């Protein structure tokens, strides 16, 4: 079954609950989000915190996860010293953190 078919099937069953604001969950856990990358900074520095935030939302009843990539861009990561390859790895990690938590 494709992702589109899976989503269509889930929506046909009724409401689907999206997880909450990643930055809110991370800030509530005490993480500093003052960086220009906001929650995406933690992908490089503390990816386990991102996974834990996703897990908390799933445990609270979320069906769907958003990723910690709101401010994540190649340019943004470059400003923090990450090359294009590392930035791509971090963007992929944002998805992997959500999948791991699920």
Image: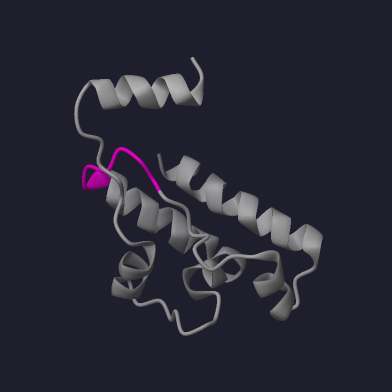
Q: Position of residue 65 (x, y in %)?
A: 39, 46
Can you name the residue that lies furthest to the top here? 1
Quarter of the image for residue 26 reads bottom left
Q: Is residue 6 above or below residue 30?
A: above
Q: Is residue 63 magenta?
A: yes
Number of callouts: 0
Q: Is residue 74 above or below residue 56?
A: below
Q: Where is residue 25 in the image (x, y as percent from the top left)?
A: 32, 65
Q: Which of 30 and 76 is in front in this view?
A: 76
Instruction: Give the residues drawn in magenta, as a range.
Output: 59-65
Please state if 47 lies on the left or on the right of 31 as rendered.
Answer: right
Residue ID at (46%, 85%): 34
Majority SS type along the magenta span: loop
Q: Is residue 17 magenta?
A: no
Where the C terminus falls, by quadrant?
A: top left
Q: Where is residue 37 in the image (x, y as percent from the top left)?
A: 55, 75
Quarter of the image for residue 72 reads bottom right
Please state if 24 lies on the left or on the right of 48 as rendered.
Answer: left
Residue ID at (48%, 42%): 100
Q: Nearer the viewer, residue 47 or 83?
A: 83
Q: In this view, does 59 lie above or below 71?
A: above
Q: How is the image coloured?
A: one colour
Q: Where is residue 31 in the image (x, y as percent from the top left)?
A: 40, 76
Please state if 73 lies on the left or on the right of 65 as rendered.
Answer: right
Can you name the residue that lies furthest to the bottom here? 34
């Amino acid at each position: 079954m494709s992702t589109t078919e899976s989503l269509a099937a889930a929506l046909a069953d009724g409401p689907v609950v999206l997880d909450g604001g990643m930055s809110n969950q991370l800030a509530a856990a005490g993480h500093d989000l003052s960086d220009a990358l906001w929650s995406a900074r933690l992908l490089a520095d503390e990816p386990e915190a991102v996974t834990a935030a996703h897990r908390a939302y799933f445990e609270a009843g979320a069906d769907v996860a958003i990723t910690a990539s709101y401010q994540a861009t190649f340019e943004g990561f470059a400003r923090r010293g990450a090359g294009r390859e590392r930035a791509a790895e971090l963007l992929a990690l944002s998805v992997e953190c959500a999948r791991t938590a699920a």
